[in-house]
Amino acid sequence: MVNWKINNPYRVYLIKLNCTEIWRLLSQSPHVEKSS
């Protein structure tokens, strides 16, 4: 249980970071037009 409490925020952080990375890669893709 303690492990889960420690792991959960870390996992959320990783997911957040991963989404940012994916978005950054998508933004860099030539076939994807940047909107906003």
Image (cartoon, grey):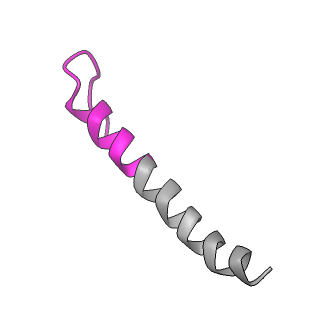
Q: Is residue 12 magenta?
A: no
Q: What's the residue at 34%, 46% (across, down)?
A: 21
In front: 28, or 6? Answer: 6
Farthest right residue in view: 1
Where residue 31 appears, as percent x and y from the top left, is 25, 15
Q: Is residue 3 left or right of residue 1?
A: left
Q: Is residue 20 left or right of residue 29?
A: right
Where residue 20 appears, as percent x and y from the top left, is 38, 50
Where residue 34 appears, as percent x and y from the top left, is 27, 32
Displayed quadrant of residue 12: bottom right
Q: What's the residue at 59%, 73% (across, down)?
A: 9
Quadrant for the C terminus, please: top left
Quadrant for the N terminus, please: bottom right
Decide: is 34 above or below 21.
above
Q: What's the residue at 31%, 31% (across, down)?
A: 26
Where residue 8 appears, as percent x and y from the top left, is 65, 70
Q: Is residue 5 left or right of residue 31?
A: right
The region drawn magenta spans: 19-36
Decide: is 33 above or below 23.
above
